[in-house]
Image: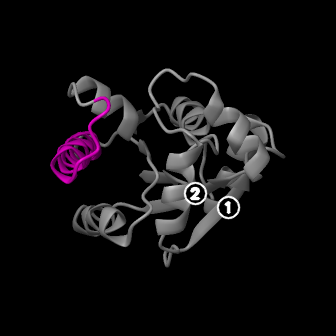
Amino acid sequence: MLLMITGLPGTGKTTFAQFLAEALQGKHFNTDIIRDQLGLRGQYDQASKNRVYEALFFQTRTSLSQNIPVVVDGTFYKKELRKPFLDLAKEMDCPIHWVEITADEPIIKERVSQKRAYSEADFDVYLKIKADFEPMEEEHLILRSDQLTVEKMIELTKSYYGLSI
């Protein structure tokens, strides 16, 4: 099973994704963590982005081929970033579920002003990605991290997708 966690910077994607992966006894892969592992912190040119997403895709494919549930977390703000994962799920005959995490902008502004372990996104980055975000065409669940506990978000995801967690 492949769960794709998407949303703008500062919405709480990574916190939710980590807890969800733990509940699924699966793997959690995150674009910011992979960027750090590749030594690409602070590098957001197209070549660096491509390396991050290629590594993310490879790790996802490897875990899925071992029948390990995977939770992937990133902005996925462009259709072209989502498509390889849609194709992978189809190729591997694997269910893919999308969850978009949102929060009110003042909350996001506060969150991105705080130092975080891996994310380098500040409010200007949030605004840029928000302006460039291509609406999701995929069926997806929308969860508000500023109104729900992580436990409730997991419960709603489980219910919406009929998961046995």
Q: Residue at x 47, y 32 (%)?
A: 119
Is the Cβ of the residue at disc 1 closer than 8 Å to that at disc 2?
A: yes
Front-most of residues 62 and 36 = 36
Secondary structure category for the residue under label 2: strand
Q: Residue at x 24, y 39 (%)?
A: 59
**Residue 165 magenta:** no
Residue 97 in view (yes/no): yes
Q: Residue at x 24, y 31 (%)?
A: 40
Q: Of the numbered discs in the image, which one, if any, rests on residue 99?
A: 2
Residue 30 in view (yes/no): no
Give the crowd class for mark 2: few <14, some 14-19, many >=20 residues within 10 Å. many
Front-most of residues 44 and 23 = 44
Relative height, residue 145 to residue 87 (above, below): above
> What's under tag 2, amino acid-wise?
Val
| Residue at numbered disc 1 | 142
Q: Position of residue 160 (x, y in %)?
A: 68, 61
The image quarter containing residue 88 is bottom left
Residue sticking out furthest to the right: 147
> What's under tag 1, amino acid-wise?
Ile
Q: Quarter of the image for the C terminus: give it.
A: top right
- Specify the segment rendered in magenta: 41-64
